[in-house]
Amino acid sequence: MKTKRTPIPWFAWLLPAVVIALAFAQEVVTISDAQIAQLAQQFGPTARERLTGWRALMTTPRNKSLPERQKLELVNDYVNRTPFKSDAEHWGKEDYWASPIEFLSTNGGDCEDFSIAKYFTLRALGVPDEKLQITYVKEIKVYNEAHMVLAYFATADAEPVILDNINKTIQPASTRTDLVPVYSFNGSGLWLAKEQTGRGQSVGSSDRIGHWKDLQTRMRGST
């Protein structure tokens, strides 16, 4: 019989457990008309609609000037319109981290893809990297499996709010007692945590993480 765990409040543990270096976080955030046309030919009119809408969301001056909370709402709502599809169903692989362009053009993805797309889109809208952490968790109340969400910190010592594709309402992290943390990352560096609080020890390059290294290579190749 499994031992029941009492979830630790997010404000107590949601500090960088793993933060992955990503120097090109704001470089790969646009897509050309030619790329959109090519992907629409391959994946159909939905790809054109989704990619055109995504580009407009990131480049419209009004969106760039919104308060950050409104940027969160805008991006969370837009990305969450994409259907959930497992990696096995969608890519024929056990685990695949899609780029935002792959995620939107194929009109489907799993929790990693939702979180990655939100992260890059918010970075394109000018949200500082230090305020965002892609966070790998375990969902313990419904699915009892690994999951990924995006956390936003208004200030360095603030309790984060959570952008999620399962629970689509942005909520303070302390209310998400269904989630148990494993690690988190953004574009600032790489750390491993030794305990529930504190930043832990720097361990260097993100090349140790195969899925993220593969994503970087594919995104650089798309520019």
Image (cartoon, helix red, strand yellow):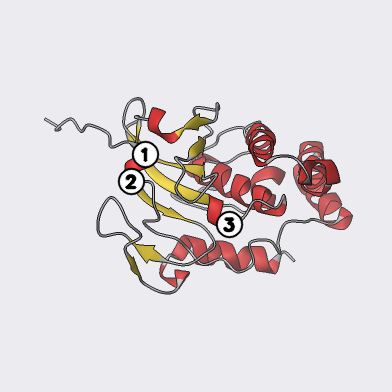
Left or right of 12 on screen, residue 127:
right
Camera-nearest residue between 121 and 32: 121
For residue 37, above or below residue 219 = above
> What residue does disc 3 label?
129
Residue type (three-letter) at the residue carrying disc 2: Trp
Say if mark 1 contacts mark 2, CB within 8 Å: yes
Q: Where residue 45 appears, x then y in whole percent?
A: 82, 38
The x, y position of residue 83, in whole percent, is 61, 32
* Quarter of the rendering containing residue 191: bottom left
Q: Earlier in the sequence, mark 2 or mark 3?
A: 2
Q: CA distance from mark 2 to mark 3?
A: 19 Å
Locate residue 176 relative to residue 164 in the image: left or right.
left
Classify 10 Å Cα crowding around label 3: few (below 14), some (14-19), many (20 and above). some
Residue at image position (27%, 50%) is 196
Q: Is residue 40 above or below residue 172?
A: below
Which mark identifies residue 10? 1
Q: Looking at the picture, which amino acid does disc 1 mark?
A: Trp
* C-alpha span from label 1 to label 2: 5 Å
- Secondary structure under badge 1? helix
Which picture quadrant has residue 48? top right
The answer for how far apart the CA atoms under marks 1 and 3 are is 19 Å
Circle 2 is placed at which residue position?
13
Q: Earlier in the sequence, mark 1 or mark 3?
A: 1
